[in-house]
Amino acid sequence: MQPLTIRHGKLPAEFISMPPVSSRSADPTGATAGFYVADVHIAKGRIDSVSTTAQPAPDALNADGCYVLPGFVDIHVHGAMGRDVMDADPHGLLEMARFFAGHGVTSFMPTTMTASPAETLAAVDGVSRAIALQQTLTTAAARGARMLGIHLEGPFISPQFPGAQPANQIRPPDVHEFETLASAGPVRMITLAPEQPAAAALIEAAQRRGIITVYGHTAATYEQCQAAIALGVQQATHTYNAMSGLHHRRPGALGATLSDPRVYAQLIADTIHVHPAAMNILARCKGADRTVLITDAMRAAGLPDGQYSLGGQDVFVHEGECRLADGTLAGSVLTMDKALPNFLAAADQSLAELWPTSSRTPAMSIKVDHEIGAILPGYRADLVLLEENTLEVAATIVQGEIAYLRHVARRQI
């Protein structure tokens, strides 16, 4: 693993040992408000140092005109490029990983959906084999974004809020089935409906294993959500979608999410699942340190409009909307490099204020923020370079190696 220097990029000011540049000041280094120009030095796959003075480097990326951010972390994504986690195909998962890297993602959690016990177990095994296969590949371009573990979305959800999950496979929480799945592969998170029978026992079982529990696809009352939070539930799946809404006398799951500072709020920021005004409200209630941008992308991501499948159901994609035949939204074709600008626009806040929602906050939400989500010495060198004017991905660095490079001219060897 060769040393690499990211040269002359604009880093969030908190990672630089000097104050941010005022938006009113003219700065000769070309820094902008909340960012400062610096070099990032990488060795053995980790951040070695960050400096504001140029140093010789045998291998460098020219980040002039780019923001340099911690790589995007997508903790809720089902598929892309015609592939789906439920296919249980390691090669398909690797194709997804490469696609995600091209959109700035350095880590992701393959996410299952409600299915039979056998199909879910096969999907867990498929991710386990994909992670093992990924580790044998010799280049970052071949490996793509790193798989952090499995997110089980269902099957222990509410039949009142199935969304696009196959309703005939929804079932009450079963600790034995959960333990079987958790023993079969690197399960890191599970979305469930906390009001369902035996949900409390399953939450406690997950806590014992260090698995993050999330409420979603839920008809839970505010009080039931509060009880689940007390047991250790820490997140809400795709906030606003497939959950009991906010009423002034019945705050519901949405009310619990918006009002409780302990809860991380996942958000599909495609402006289809959630109106920009509602996204703005979420930003005001939760802030950058509790909002988690996700894609919830399905196999049509990266492909043209048309007919696809999700959990054995036909999905029709038209102008960015993915719907079942009855009109129900069925995942998205969103990518993280689009989610972040969408959220900035809806929240009417700056990149300097909200960049954590795409990296540091997701990392915090699954307790890996000691490794990723920051540009600090000792952290994994997982980075994304965004063009300053467009926020398009210029390069993606995964564990110190270039996984995606838009223009080869940026490489300086």
Image (cartoon, rainbow, N blue to C red):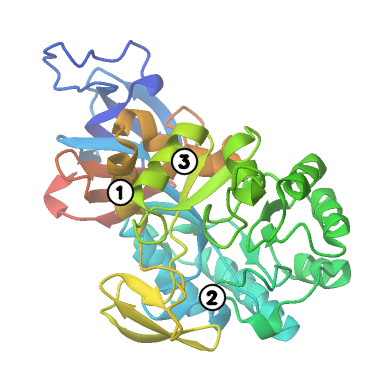
| Residue at the extreme front | 249
First along the sequence among labels 1 and 3: 3
Kindly state the secondary structure of the residue where label 3 is placed.
Answer: helix
x%, y% of residue 49? 40, 25
Kindly state the secondary structure of the residue where label 2 is placed.
Answer: loop
Kindly state the secondary structure of the residue where label 1 is placed.
Answer: helix
Residue at left 62%, top 32%? Answer: 261
Answer yes or no: is residue 287 visible: no
Query: Mark 1 and mark 3: span between their CA atoms?
Result: 13 Å
Q: Residues within 10 Å of mark 2 (few under 14, many from 20)?
A: many
Residue placed most toward the observer, 124 or 201? 201
Provide the residue designation for mark 3: 282
Q: Quadrant of residue 32?
A: top left
Q: What's the residue type where badge 2 is placed? A: Ala
Numbered mark located on residue 164 in the image: 2
First along the sequence among labels 1 and 2: 2
Query: Mark 1 and mark 2: span between their CA atoms?
Result: 23 Å
- Against 191, residue 384 (above or below) is above
Provide the residue designation for mark 1: 342
